[in-house]
């Protein structure tokens, strides 16, 4: 048996798995004739039993070809039934909602049983992909927890909470390595690929194909697919080629050899399959096989974030994901962290040959969905301070280990984004304009940005100030350039890894970089931040606040969880000036500035990224601008520790925060002698040679 077959067996099954599956489903069916003395808990276990039996029925339906033979109406009805319980209109009475679970079952058991239900819902994807073993282990987990309640009920009481918690704790410990193996194989060794098979072998003009994935399907995915059906092959080819060429150029621009790679990941949201199919074919032409893996809503993968970082359909209920992002708080301790790190290492060792051949991800994102600002629930599980530090430490250590196998300095990536129909009635027009923005002539920007970089390279530091109600006032220190003929502080960024064109960026010196960063409103990783203010001292976050919630405590916790990712502080990893005024004008024209993807938004004004630099794990690779100048600003005082104290060099996060032009008073490059060169004043480019950038602003 090969290693690939071993992992496939784990996911799909063998004779032993078949027997375990049959026994588990028989036992679950038997719950129908049983009742616990406590009515509330009896109701919970019967509700979850019904869900598991629906999973069993879905597995058999999928196995027998239902995905290919059912009518569109039947597929829609099945899809709605699978996800109905957690949809916003039903969430108030769902055990997936920790508020409802705690009200019904009490806070002691409500939280943990709601978390159990969250884990079990990941079996929807397993049923579609015929991953019998994944269903077995989760169903057995449910039965073990149920058995604890049955045994206690015989004595007229409830089980000890710690006994139930231990059952779930050991589930996440025992299967940590196997789950990591499967996921790592999907990334670096995509021999068997469920998504790719659907994309490449389905009739993409028949909307029924969307329901084969097992993801929740909304009007967004349907209308996106329909819009792409109406586009010509030439239009699809242009978009897909921009996408895949960005990936190829990303290797070339950084001097990396793409010819030594044989695989790449394609990550996207459902509805864009015509583009993805062409992209897969484009990658094949340059010797890369595409792996397309789904996001799994499971405690094995959440890691304190509600962001879906792999392929997915519509998100049935963003509040559901947010409510369970910290379910690790039930179990996380030093032993479990060590177990997970062992799993990362084991997966890397098993697939180290394949990992060496992995080129990195190509990501197609969507933007324009209905804005989401989460509700903070005391009933949801929250990490303790100690657990937050453990989780942050785990992410850092896991990234260091993974970088030994997927070597950062040898891989690349690309990201592009397009609107989804939720963006409004002008969706088609917005989509077409986005295509134009994503395919702008990079030569124009490259030459203008050189003038900006030449001015910035005169400076010791840069000052950035807001105007109007924007309170930004920050000083950004730059590295010393010893040879201005051959060196530069700023990268001239065009349409390669980050599409569209339009920014110059650097990694600032932290010492002396201080002040206030403020934006009136911004969406970061799909979450809205109102009146966000961050104070920096010597390049690191000193204080922060926003106005999303009534209490300062809730506002600070919201930022710490979703921008600092539970670190006590983060450095400024990047300072950039966005130059894509066409994108800025486009956003104002359609009144969608608050819905832009960060890829576009970061090009519409200066931005600061907190966390790692843009050159994480690649600091020692020489990179050059098109004029031949070498970038010298590839590290800061923290990332420079990578050789002596790597645990303290990285944070495994990088979040861009953009100040829009209409809130920007001034960007000024200040020389050693105190004289300066103004780049932007009152939201307009004033540096000689950059006037072309103001034309879209005047339209």
Image: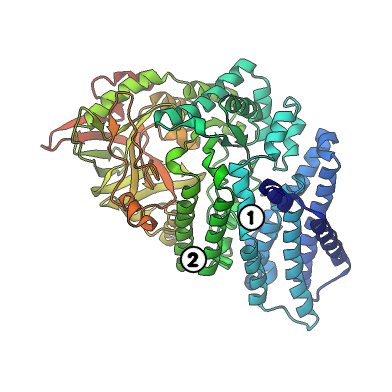
Name the mark on residue 387: 2
**What is the x, y in percent for residue 488?**
26, 32
Q: Dividing the picture into quarters, in which one does residue 427 lie?
A: top right
Report the mark closest to the observer, 1 or 2: 1
Residue denoted by label 1: 179
**In the current view of this chain or complex, which residue is farthest to the right?**
33
| Separation of marks 1 and 2 at Cα, in angstroms | 22 Å
**How many numbered marks are there?**
2
Q: Nearer the viewer, residue 181 or 146?
A: 181
Left or right of 558? Residue 624 is: left
Residue at horizontal 43 percent and vertical 34 percent from the top:
601
Residue at horizontal 50 percent and vertical 20 percent from the top:
436
Q: Is residue 588 above or below residue 291?
A: above
Within 10 Å of the Cα at label 1, are there few (<14), some (14-19), or many (20+) other Cα atoms?
Answer: some
Q: Marks 2 and 1: in contact by CB < 8 Å?
A: no
Left or right of 351? Residue 652 is: left
**What is the x, y in percent for residue 611?**
39, 49
Q: Nearer the viewer, residue 689 or 56?
A: 56
Name the mark on residue 695: none
Q: Is residue 338 above or below residue 398?
A: below
**In the current view of this chain or complex, which residue is farthest to the bottom?**
155
Q: Is residue 566 above or below residue 353?
A: below
Within 10 Å of the Cα at label 2, are there few (<14), some (14-19), or many (20+) other Cα atoms?
Answer: many
Residue 550 makes an appearance in the image: no
Q: Nearer the viewer, residue 368 or 283?
A: 283
**In the current view of this chain or complex, which residue is farthest to the left?**
673
Residue 630 makes an appearance in the image: yes
**What is the x, y in percent for residue 422?**
60, 34
What SS does tag 2 mark? helix
């Amino acid at each position: 048996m090969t290693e690939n077959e071993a992992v496939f067996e784990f996911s799909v099954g063998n004779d032993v798995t078949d027997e375990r599956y049959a026994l588990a489903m028989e036992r679950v069916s038997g719950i129908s004739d049983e009742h616990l003395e406590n009515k509330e808990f009896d109701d919970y276990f019967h509700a979850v039993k019904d869900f598991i039996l629906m999973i069993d029925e879905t597995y058999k339906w999928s196995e027998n070809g239902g995905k290919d033979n059912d009518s569109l109406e039947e597929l829609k009805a099945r899809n709605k039934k699978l996800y109905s319980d957690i949809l916003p209109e039903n969430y108030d009475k769902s055990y997936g909602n920790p508020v409802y679970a705690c009200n019904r079952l009490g806070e002691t058991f409500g939280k943990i049983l709601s978390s159990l239900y969250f884990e079990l819902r990941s079996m929807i994807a397993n049923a579609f992909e015929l991953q019998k073993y994944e269903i077995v282990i989760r169903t057995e987990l449910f039965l073990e927890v149920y058995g604890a309640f049955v045994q206690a009920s015989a004595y007229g009481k409830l089980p000890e909470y710690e006994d139930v918690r231990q059952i779930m704790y050991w589930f996440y410990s025992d299967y940590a390595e196997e789950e990591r193996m499967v996921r790592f194989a999907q990334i670096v060794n995509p021999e068997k690929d469920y998504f790719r098979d659907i994309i490449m072998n389905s009739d993409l003009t028949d909307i029924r194909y969307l329901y084969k994935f097992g993801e929740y399907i909304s009007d967004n995915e349907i209308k996106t697919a329909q819009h792409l059906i109406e586009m010509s092959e030439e239009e699809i080819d242009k978009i897909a080629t921009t996408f895949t060429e960005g990936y190829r150029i990303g290797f070339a621009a950084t001097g990396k050899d793409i010819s030594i790679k044989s695989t790449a990941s394609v990550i996207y949201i459902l509805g864009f399959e015509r583009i993805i199919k062409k992209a897969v074919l484009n990658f094949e032409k340059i010797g890369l096989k595409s792996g397309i893996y789904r996001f799994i809503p499971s405690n094995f993968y959440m890691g304190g974030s509600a962001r879906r970082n792999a392929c997915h359909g519509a998100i049935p209920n963003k509040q559901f994901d947010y409510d369970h992002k910290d379910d690790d708080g039930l179990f996380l301790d030093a032993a479990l962290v060590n177990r997970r790190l062992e799993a990362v290492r084991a997966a890397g060792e098993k697939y180290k040959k394949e990992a060496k051949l992995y080129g990195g991800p190509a990501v197609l994102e969507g933007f324009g969905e209905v804005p989401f600002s989460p509700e903070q629930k005391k009933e949801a599980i929250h990490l303790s301070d100690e657990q937050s530090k453990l989780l942050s430490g785990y992410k850092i250590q896991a990234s260091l280990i993974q970088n030994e196998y997927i070597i950062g300095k040898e891989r690349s990536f690309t990201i592009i984004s397009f609107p989804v129909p939720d963006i409004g009635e002008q969706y088609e027009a917005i989509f077409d304009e986005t295509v134009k923005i994503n395919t702008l002539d990079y030569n124009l920007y490259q030459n203008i940005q050189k003038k900006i970089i030449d001015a910035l390279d005169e400076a010791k530091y840069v000052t950035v100030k807001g105007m109007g109600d924007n309170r930004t006032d920050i000083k950004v220190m730059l590295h010393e350039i010893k040879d201005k003929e051959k060196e530069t502080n700023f990268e001239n960024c065009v349409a390669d890894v980050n599409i569209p064109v339009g920014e110059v960026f650097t990694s600032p010196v932290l010492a002396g970089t201080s002040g206030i960063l403020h934006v009136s409103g911004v969406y970061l990783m799909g979450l809205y931040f109102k009146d966000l203010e961050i104070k920096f001292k010597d390049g690191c976050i000193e204080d922060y606040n926003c106005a999303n919630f009534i209490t300062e405590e809730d506002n600070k916790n919201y930022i710490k969880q979703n921008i600092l990712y539970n670190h006590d502080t983060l450095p400024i990893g990047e300072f950039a000036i966005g130059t894509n005024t066409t994108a800025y004008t486009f956003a104002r024209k359609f009144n969608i500035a608050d819905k832009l993807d960060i890829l576009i938004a970061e090009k519409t004004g200066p931005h600061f990224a907190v966390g790692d630099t843009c050159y994480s794990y690649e600091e020692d690779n020489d990179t050059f601008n098109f004029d031949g100048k070498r970038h010298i600003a590839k590290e800061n005082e923290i990332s420079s520790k990578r050789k002596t104290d790597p645990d303290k060099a990285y944070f495994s996060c990088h979040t861009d925060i953009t100040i829009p032009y209409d809130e920007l008073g001034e960007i000024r490059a200040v020389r050693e002698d105190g004289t300066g060169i103004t780049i932007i004043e009152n939201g307009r480019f004033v540096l000689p040679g950059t006037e072309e950038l103001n034309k879209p602003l005047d339209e």
